[in-house]
Amino acid sequence: MLFLKSTSVTRAPGIYDVDIAAKPPGKTFGVFIATDPDNPPREVLAALAGLGFQNTYRQSYTHKDRGKVLDLHFQKDGTDLFKGWKTEECEANLRALEEIFRSIGIAITPRVMSLAEAYA
């Protein structure tokens, strides 16, 4: 879940925030998006599906400022051990994700989660 400060501002239509993060050691990334359920980012969701990312988690909640939020998590299986991404897959997938989000004005910064965050 992304920790939003407010739902009064979106980073792009229908998107409050985006996080591209991997559990250590950091080669297989997930996409975490906090969306406006009344104005879903259909093009972004379709683009993620087109790349092979599958929705693995969805939770609706009301933010403390009374805005509605739909939290979505996406993952894509790779061909490495335990369905992880090989280096080439990682590079190609991150390039594709950067292009998807750049096209709507969002710059992404992929990151590796801390152990505490990854296994909480």
Image: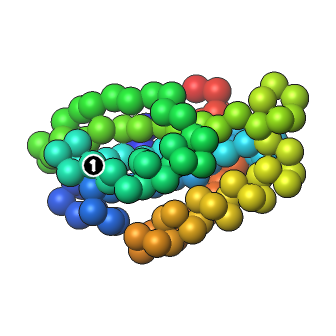
Q: Residue at x 78, y 29 (%)?
A: 83
Is residue 43 shown left or right of residue 64? right
* Quarter of the picture holding the C terminus: top right
Picture quadrant where residue 78 is located: top right
Q: Which residue is drawn at 18% across and 59% down?
A: 8
* Quarter of the picture holding the N terminus: top left
Amino acid of disc 1: Pro
The location of residue 107, given as percent across then percent down, is 51, 71
Q: Which residue is drawn at 38% across and 56% down?
A: 43
Placement of 26 over or under 9, stated as above or below: above
Picture quadrant where residue 28 is located: top right
Residue placed most toward the observer, 44 or 25: 44
Q: Residue at x 59, y 59 (%)?
A: 97
Residue lying farthest front? 50
The location of residue 94, given as percent across then percent down, is 68, 58
Is residue 73 shown left or right of residue 63? right
Placement of 103 over or under 14, stated as above or below: below
Is residue 117 shown left or right of residue 19? right
Circle 1 residue: 40
The location of residue 49, given as percent across then percent down, is 51, 43
Residue lying farthest left? 66
Residue 64 visible in the displayed image: no
